[in-house]
Amino acid sequence: MSQRNNWTFLFALAFCLSAWLPFSPVMLLGQDVVVDPAKPVAASTQDEVPKDAQKKPEGYVFTIDRLIDTTPVKDQGQTGTCWSFATASFVESEVMRMGGPQLDLSEMFIVRKMYERKAQNYLWRQGKTNFGEGALAHDYINTIEAAGLVPEQVFPGNRAEGGSGHDHAEVEAVVGGMLKALEGRGKLGHRWHDAVSAVLDVYVGSAPERFDWEGKSWTPTEFRDHLGVCPADYVNLTSFSHHPFGKPFVLEIPDNFSGGSFDNVPLDDLMAIMNRAIDSGYTVAWDGDVSESGFVADQGFAVLPPESGGQQWRRAPESEPAVDQRMRQDAFEAMSTTDDHLMHLVGRAHDQNGRAYYIVKNSWGVKGKLDGYVYLSEGYIRMKTMAISVHRDVLQPGLAGGANSDAGTATSAAEAGKTQENKSGPGNDK
């Protein structure tokens, strides 16, 4: 083959790979991603970084340090089911990390099962809780333990009437209204569950008990086990000082409808665990606050604006407040940090000033300058992380990777608590 033909072949191969890669083509390891808020560009456009190191380009320039394999960005539509989309993406990456195939798992299968669980919880608690769309990562994990997994192709879920996306506004209104009426009647009959299930069949779809996949018949639990996903392998962690460190506690947020316990670790340990996870090839299911002026999803970044005020941070990176445990706790107790949204943390990067960022995959569709990805600054992560879920192996000090902490507190907390879940109770998601 001639040299010219060699180059032609390589160019064609690179073009094909760029379309096949499971993450945004602008997010290639070691390359710079330029986000200039004053200069709207197509999401796949990449500006050149000036060669003169003394000159800093306009906007945010990110260099990716580590990016873990993940699946394409999806869109939760007009639903409060970010918890299912984020954790499904997390599990998809886990399957790939363990040597399995790239899969598209059904978010709506888990959502359908969760609605039934929430309806039962509402009636058991005699209406002293909420029926809503929200939940947390551990609820997804608990549901796959009880109900299994199915591919998206098998159960995509019903779309909105006259549209192509999901919309669960009527689900919450209709089922919630039924439950409220039932709760007011006192003693229940035996058919209410069938009635609620029939409504869910109309709006969400009828979940399969068995399906065919790649020439074989599976139950959802058989498929889960085939993929090698073991729900007991995942732990949930948080960091708040109103409970003792090293012990699990039930996190007091509305979307923790199941009363799930979280291992409580110091903030620096929580950060070290996230760093160790990414550096060792594991991803993280991230729950946090996105109702902040510094969360600019369409521009692809989130930062803590400087306390002095001003809007320069929107145009280029500025210094952030140094977040410690006390600041984080004050924000939680003042309810200026709230439980808003779950996303999938898949990598690490730094900006043109050398400051650290964490790369998250969102579930609001392939939108914005980074095609549905957002870079969260280290300060933002320290202040606004509500909780995380990771594989238990990440807590082991001997795991390969670059965490600068032995995370001993986290390990002892996880082993003591085993993140036991009380599988009942309300949700209210983003």
Image: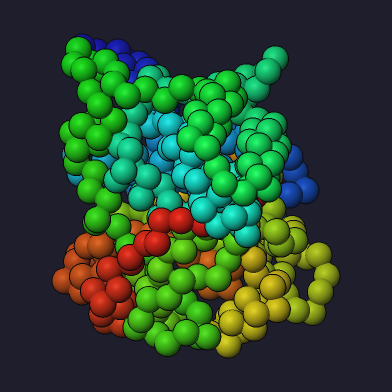
Q: Position of residue 127 (x, y in %)?
A: 63, 54
Residue drawn at point x = 48 percent, y = 35 percent = 190
Q: Position of residue 220 (x, y in %)?
A: 29, 30
Q: Position of residue 59 (x, y in %)?
A: 68, 55
Query: As displayed, is residue 99 above or below residue 336?
Result: above
* 288 and 357: which is toward the camera: 288
Query: As displayed, is residue 2 above or below residue 286?
Result: above
Position of residue 266 in the picture relative to residue 215 (left or right): right
Q: Position of residue 275 (x, y in %)?
A: 37, 66
- The scheme the figure's colours follow is rainbow
Query: As displayed, is residue 55 above or below residue 137?
Result: below
Residue drawn at point x = 59 percent, y = 79 percent = 328
Count up the numbered dots.
0
Task: Decide if residue 221 is in sight here.
Answer: yes
Residue found farthest to the right: 310
Residue drawn at point x = 25 percent, y = 62 percent = 392
* 302 and 231: which is toward the camera: 231
Q: On the rendered image, what quadrant is the N terminus found in?
A: top left
Q: Quadrant of residue 155?
A: top left
* 24 and 351: which is toward the camera: 24
Q: Quadrant of residue 19?
A: top left
Query: As displayed, is residue 186 above or below residue 236?
Result: above
Position of residue 429 in the picture relative to residue 228 (left or right): right
Task: Decide if residue 285 is in sight here.
Answer: no
* 324 and 250: which is toward the camera: 250
